[in-house]
Image: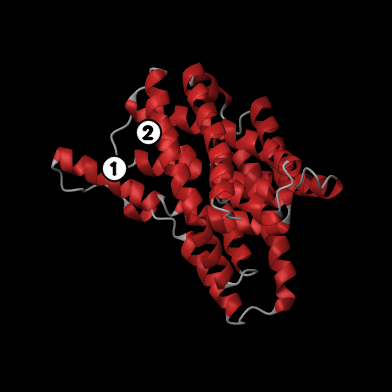
Amino acid sequence: MRVHPVLPGLLLCLVVAAIAYELGRLFPIVGGPVFGILLGVAIALVRKPNGSLRAGIKFSSKQLLQLSIVLLGFNLQLQEVVGGGLRSLPVMLGTLVIVLTAAYFVGKALGLDRDLRRLLGVGTAICGGSAIAAVSSVIDVPEADVAYAISTVFLFNVAAVLTFPAIGHLLALSQHAFGLWAGTAINDTSSVVAAGFVYGHVAGSQAVIVKLTRTTLIIPIVLFYAGKRLWHARASGGGINWSKIVPWFILWFVAAAVLNTIGVVPPALHTAFAQAALFLIVVALTGVGLCADAKGIRAAGVRPLLLGFALWVLIAVSSLAIAHAMHVS
């Protein structure tokens, strides 16, 4: 009997996630998502999952995360989605300009090449590995730079999950304020979801709305770099796979919110959808942890890590400052 290539890795993620989920119930201040990513990283550092497991791990960390976000949409009203996105837009655009500018000048001062500065900048400003992959698909960039950027951003994603909830409590941030901060200042969607739901369900939902709005910034950024490349090369643009760049799951998330808004989703199912979404988030973050590449992080060297750290601190501070100055929460 032939086993589907996704099944072995998916089963590993489910088993580890079940343990993480129960640990999260025992220690809610840490939460299942954080336990998932920590257990995944620990396993990956002891023994990197082999080739037969990778397809299922990748499926868990990508497709299941997207499915969990769609399920969250069934608990939201459309006006919450639109209102949250619009309120957070000034913070998003402000941090985008600040981080991209800093990536250019600080990265140049550190002696990093232009491509690596670009990748670290968009990875920090927009959505981590997804933005790095999208931009690298439309510019001619060395694979080593992509690996360095993803490894560096991944390191600070983990740091954000572990530190942001504690900092939020120290600053006495409200659920909505923390959701805005997490959604605009943490790089990768998985880490945003983890930190948000550790802080609280309201914070998690708010963080998802803000993050998904922020993720759409991939599209104009990629269009800019693709247009620049095509302009300089005077090429036809063939070979750019736009279907892999556009984050289609955002449309399904909005559709789920629409169905809930018009009353198609019975209120009795809200709790079930929320619990299913949380468990899938734990499974996805377990997959993210299992993808940890210690060699890639070591190979990146000190300078990309210094730039990644500087941008991580800058976006965290500037997000809070802009939100406070504009009274956005």
Q: Residue furthest left?
A: 234
Specify the quadrant that holds the C terminus. bottom right
Q: Position of residue 75 (x, y in %)?
A: 65, 69
Q: Give the residue pinned by disc 1.
A: 225
Q: Position of residue 243 (x, y in %)?
A: 36, 56
In terms of secondary structure, where does tag 2 sit?
helix
Check disc 2: other Cα within 10 Å, few if <14, some if 14-19, many if 20+: many
Q: Amino acid at mark 2?
A: Arg
Viewer-proximal residue among 50 and 30: 30
Asked if labels 1 and 2 touch by Cβ distance under 8 angstroms, the answer is yes
Q: Earlier in the sequence, mark 2 or mark 1?
A: 2
Using the image, determine if residue 304 lies above or below residue 89.
Answer: above
Q: Which mark is residue 118?
A: 2
Q: Position of residue 196 (x, y in %)?
A: 66, 50
Viewer-proximal residue among 160 and 154: 160
Residue 58 appears in the picture as rendered: no
In terms of secondary structure, where does tag 1 sit?
helix
Q: Residue furthest bottom?
A: 263
